[in-house]
Image (spheres, helix red, strand yellow):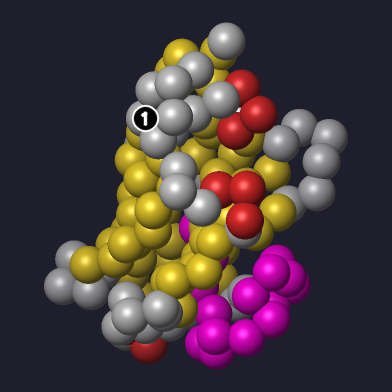
Amino acid sequence: QVQLVESGGGLVQAGDSLRLSCAASGRIFSNYNMGWFRQAQGKEREFVSLISKSGGARSYIDSMKGRFTISRDNAKNTVYLQMNNLSPEDTAVYYCAAKKYYSDIYSAAQYEYWGQGTQVIVSS
C-alpha cells in the first residue's frame, strides 16, 4: 500500500502561483511514477502531469505546458506541482496518484493509489 496526502491548495487570484505537495508513505516511493490529476465540479477527472520514478521523464497535458511544472524529491518521498499564472479555469480538486508503469498515463483507471485531493480555487 502507498498512502498519499496532498497539501498546498487554497484560494488565489488569477495570475497567482501555487505549489502543491504530495507526501507518500508505505511502499518505496522511488518505485512509482507519480502523477497529478484534477477534477472540476461536474467534470471528469483529467490528467495534469506525470513524473517518472527517477524524475528523468515528465509528461504534461498540452494546455498546461509552460505553466505547470512537476518535480519530485525521492529523499523526502514527496512530489510537487508548481502552478503559475493560474486562471479560474484551473479551479478544481487536485489529486496525487501513483502507478508502477510509465504507460497509459492519461487514464485515471491505470493509477493504483490516490490521495484525497486538495482544493484549488482561482478567483477572477
Residue 30 vs residue 91, the one in the foreground: 91
* Residue at image point 50% right, 39% down: 118
Residue range (magenta): 95-110
Q: Residue at x 61, y 22 (%)?
A: 88
Q: Is residue 52 visible?
A: yes
Point out residue 34 in the picture as x, y percentages from the top left corner: 45, 70
Residue 43 place in picture, x, y as percent: 82, 41
Three-letter amino acid code at disc 1? Ser
Residue 95 vertical placement versus 33 (above, below): above
Q: Residue at x 57, y 10 (%)?
A: 124
Please provide percent x and percent y for residue 117: 54, 46
Q: Secondary structure at mark 1?
A: loop
Residue situated in front as seen by the camera: 18 or 68: 68
In the orientation shown, which residue stands out farthest toward the top?
Answer: 124
Check disc 1: other Cα within 10 Å, few if <14, some if 14-19, many if 20+: some
Q: Position of residue 8 (x, y in %)?
A: 36, 37
Mark 1 sits on what residue?
17
Whether 113 is drawn above or below 101: the answer is above
Q: Residue at x 70, y 54 (%)?
A: 46
Q: Residue furthest left?
A: 75
- Asked if residue 65 lies in the magenta stretch, the reply is no
Q: Is residue 47 above or below residue 123?
A: below
